[in-house]
Every structure is written in C-alpha cells, then in structure tokens.
Amino acid sequence: MKISCGIDFGTSNSAIAAVCPGQEPRLVKSPEGKVTMPTAVFYPAAKELTPCFGMSAVQAYVNAERGRFMRSMKRVLGTPLMGSLTEVNGRNLQFEEILAAFIGYLTSLAEREFGAEIAQVVMGRPVHFRDGDPAGDRQAEKELRQVAEAVGFKEIEFQFEPIAAAYAHEIKLRQEKLACVIDIGGGTSDFTVIRLSPGRQQESDRRNDILGSSGIRIGGNDFDKDLALQSFMPELGYGSFYASRSSSSQQLTVPAGIYHDLAEWSKINSLYTYKTLKLVRGLKLQAEEPDKIARLEEVLEQECGHSLLGAVEAGKIAAGQQEEVCKRLEFIGDKPAIRILRREFEKAIEKNVGKISAAMGESLKQAGIKAGDIELVILTGGSTEIPAVQKSLCAFFPGAGVSQDDKLSSVGLGLAYDSMRRFG
Ligand SMILES: Nc1ncnc2c1ncn2[C@@H]1O[C@H](COP(=O)(O)OP(=O)(O)OP(=O)(O)O)[C@@H](O)[C@H]1O
Ligand SMILES: [Mg+2]
C-alpha cells in the first residue's frame, strides 16, 4: 500500500498527517494522544540511553533529568550553525542528525499507525526561512531536504506552510472565496492570498489560484525575546552596571549579548560553557547589583535557561488575556517575582508586530488586490492567539469573515492533502 504524508516541522510544534489511497488524510496522534507535539529533543547524559522527543523530552527536562534539552531547532536551518558540530553530553553531533532523529521519530509514529513504510513526503516550509537572503533560503530548504533523505524518504516535495493551511480549510467551504491566510507561528509569520473553492480541491496545479505569498522570520519566539528583555532579564542584571577594573570611577553596562542569547530558544545551550560562567562570576564581583548577577550565574550553573524562557512564554500567553500577570521564578534560589502589565507587553512586541503587518501587506501587493477584496481571513499558528496581534492584522479586513479552527494542526493536515494531490 502506497502511503504518503505531510510533515509540518514547526519551530515550536510539529505534526504529521498521512493518507492511504482512496481515503481522507488524517493527523497522527502522539503517544499522549495529541495531533501535535512540541518540537523538542532530550539527549540523556547516559550514552546508552536513546534520545526522547516531543512531550517526553519536555517531561525529562522538567523532571531535571541529566542531559541536553533542545527546542526551536528549525531556526538553525540556513544558518552557519547547521554545518557545525554541537557538543551533546560529550558527543559531537551534527544538527542534521538531531533534526533527522526528530523527524524520523515523527515518521515512525505515522508508519506504526498506518502499518507501512512511507516513502513520499510533502514537507512544509515557511515562505522565507531567512529574510532578504535568497541564497540562505535555498540553503535552508536544501538542508531540510537532506534531513528528509537521511530519514529515508524517497520522494520529497515542499509546500509553503500558509498554502497548506489554506488547503485544510478549503475542505470546509461551500462556495468560492478569496482568502488571506495569516500563519503566525513560533519562528515565522507567513501569508498567502489564495482563491479557495470546493470545486478545485482535486486539481493538481493550483498555481493560478495562489495570488501572492510573503513571510518574515518573526514569530512567537521573538515575542518571547521582547518580553524577556523587557520584564525578566533586568531582574538577572540586564542593563545594570559594573565598575571597570582599570578605572574604578568608570561605570559600564553589563554585556547585553548573554541576555540576548538567553532570551532565544535556539541559543540557550550555547551559553552553558565554562567561559561564560567565568565571565559572569567576574562581573558579579564588580557589579553594582551583585544579587541580580548571582541569579544569572545560577541559571547558567543549573542549566535552567529553558525553564526561564518557559516562564517568559507562559507570561506572554497570560498577558494576552489579563491586564496584569505575576510570574514567580521558582527555579531560582530567591524566587524572584516578575510583574507583567498587558500594555507593557503589547508595547514590547509593537515593533515586531509592525514588521509582521508590513510583510502581510506584501502578499496583498503581489496579488494586486485591495484588502477590501478579501472575503475570508484564515488565522492559524499559535501566535495569532495574542489579541493585540489578531486585532492589528484583522483590522486590515473589516468586511471579511474570520476562520480560526485547528490553529496548530491545519498546516500538517493541509500538507497531507497536498501529498495526495501530488503523489496520487
Ligand atoms: N494563547 C497563546 N497566546 C500567545 N501565544 C501563543 C498562544 N498559544 C501558543 N502561542 C505561541 O505560538 C507559538 C507556537 O505556534 P505554532 O505551533 O503555530 O508554531 P510553529 O508552527 O511551531 O512555528 P513556525 O510555523 O513558525 O515554524 C509559540 O511561540 C507559542 O508561545
Ligand atoms: Mg507553523
């Protein structure tokens, strides 16, 4: 039996859907019974143990098991890090191997559920992996293809993630609509203007229906960073001062780079080095507020940067809904409490939200239509849950209907529909 699949390898969450000939595609459930899973890997410190993935990886990290935890691995595609080795528990691993292990795991879930090997895949991809860098973008796709080959796929096609989301929504339509898909995920924001119609679902060539596609490498991870730097990192000494060794009268700001890396999911692990720890210990001795630097030191020593950014992400989600949020950092000795005001959070992300709106305008421009021509707005991706983001984007289309079902799984399902169309 020839089964094909679609894989939504997302920055934060991933999904796989597969299809048997003559049947409808369906999403594959994780061991926890969910149709998506966190894009996460945990390599246990004991070499004889195999890595774990998704929710089990998150659990292993939360339970403070010894080992290396990784998230947002997609962000490495198309960057110099991809070709380099990363040290994981004393072993040197290529990022390609790590990505292949994760995508291989997803594939094995589908193969088990469908009871057959799967050789054909449509991989989702953002409209731009990298902004304003066509060569880097091609490189990123090439790397993802190599990962899929390493997993064992024989036929590999790519589809833009927002187009896949549109296909998943098209099934529910009763009449033709001019739609704009807004997909704001963890790593990227992607848009497509597309003509959807129940009658055209089976057509193999949809190029004439896709009027415009654009995207930008900004997503929920960047909102996490904005909020981290505004509300959390100052409590760990970000922006504070220390006295220069050469002249005791000279005040210097604590280097910002460490805090910027600590606020990025894909860079946290790079800070767990003796060199960084030594630098921070040196700063603490000269700092105006050594207690704050001591918190940073503790986060690095205990390797709990992912817990810190997890608290930021939870604060972000709560701040979308409430006027005021308080987050206590239980994993730091003195358990500092962070207060987030909704309007401050919205201010912190304002610049990135503006860039996202501008990128959306680009797909309308490509399509040669006015915002008023759009009849249906399809919201997908977890970051469209932020009310301020939703409001600012939907304001472009006052007359359009809004569809926002299956925000986390529509891309995966749509990719499987696309695989059915392409591989027959
Ligand atoms: N209720 C919420 N409020 C705000 N943000 C949310 C909410 N729920 C999820 N998110 C954010 O959505 C992002 C994950 O969304 P999603 O799973 O669509 O991304 P992804 O598909 O993994 O990423 P990408 O498509 O960019 O590769 C995370 O940044 C997460 O913090
Ligand atoms: Mg996505």
Image (tube, rainbow, N blue to C red):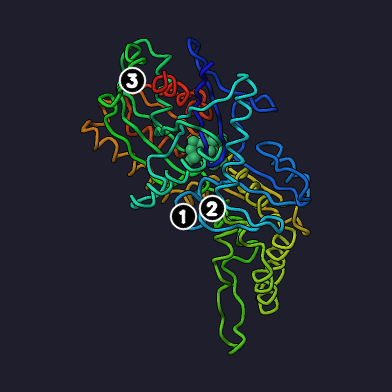
Residue at mark 1 to residue at mark 3: CA–CA distance: 33 Å
Residue 114 badge: none
Assess mark 1: CB under 8 A from ligand 1? no
Where residue 303 sits, quadrant-wise, is: bottom right
Residue at 39 percent across and 23 percent down: it is 422
Q: Residue at x 69, y 45 (%)?
A: 42
Q: Under tag 1, what secondary structure?
A: loop
Give the quarter of the image for residue 32: top right
Label located before the other in sequence (3 or 2): 3
> How many angstroms separate mark 1 from mark 2 (CA)?
19 Å
Q: Amino acid at mark 3?
A: Ser
Question: What type is the residue that disc 2 sits on?
Answer: Lys
Which numbered circle lies on residue 204?
3
Tell whether 108 sits left or right of 8: right
Q: Is residue 176 visible?
A: yes
Residue at numbered disc 1: 79
Number of numbered discs visible in the structure rendering: 3
| Label 1 close to label 3 by CB (< 8 Å) | no
SS state under label 2: helix
Q: Nearer the viewer, residue 420 or 212?
A: 420
Q: Residue furthest bottom?
A: 247
Mark 2 Cα shell of 10 Å, populated few (<14), some (14-19), many (≥20): many
Instruction: Say if 20 sits above or below 188 in the image.
Output: above
Q: In the image, which disc is placed on residue 225?
A: 2
Image position of 371 with respect to 287: above or below: above
Who is closer to the viewer here, 314 or 13? Answer: 13
| Residue 319 sits above or below residue 110 on the image | below
Image-based side of 268 in relation to 413, left or right: right
Residue 386 in sight from this viewpoint: no
Query: The residue under label 1 is which amino acid type?
Result: Thr
